[in-house]
Amino acid sequence: MITEIILMFVKAFAVGGIICTIAQLLINYTKITSGRILVYFLLSGVVLQALGLYGYLVDFAGAGATVPISGFGYLLAQGAIKGAKEGLFGAITGGITAAAAGLTAAITFGYLFALLFKPRSKKN
């Protein structure tokens, strides 16, 4: 029982770490901007889910595959695929419906932290 939990954590940490390592290597050794890397990772999650591959990674690594931005792309694609069964409108709205809880949390907590903390520029 406890070994299964530890193995689950190790797999999540390893896969999430590999995804983040790839992003960091792209930042350090290429001239690709962080914004573009973000978009590439999001689109890679969409494409891999469209091909039916990202689900295997999620089954293997759990949160290690769903927490990075590629996991958000996976979630959008999964929602769009499920929504497509209801027609074109379902395909368009399915991704947002699937990601609604995460988007709501991000907007709500972002707003709350903006109210609680005063932004200031760094002093060099």
Image: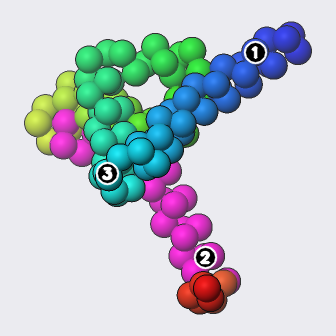
Q: Position of residue 60 (x, y in %)?
A: 57, 15
**Could you say whether the residue bearing mark 2 is in a helix, strand or loop?**
helix
Name the residue carrying label 1. Answer: 7
Question: How far is disc 1 from disc 3 in space, using C-alphas?
Answer: 35 Å
Instruction: Return the residue at label 3.
Output: 32
Tell which of 31 and 68 is nearer to you: 31
Amino acid at pointer 1: Leu
Check the picture and name the quadrant holding the N terminus.
top right
For label 3, count other residues whose C-alpha is less than 10 Å away and answer few (under 14), some (14-19) or many (20+). Answer: few
15, above or below 108, in the image: above
* Residue located beneath label 2 in the image: 112
Say what amino acid the circle numbered 3 marks.
Answer: Ile
**Residue at (11% x, 36% y) in the render:** 88
**Quadrant of residue 44 within the rendered picture:** top left
Q: CA distance from mark 3 to mark 2?
A: 32 Å
Q: Quadrant of residue 48?
A: top left
Span of residues in magenta: 91-116
Which comes sooner in the sequence, label 1 or label 3? Answer: 1
Is residue 95 at least partly visible in the picture? no
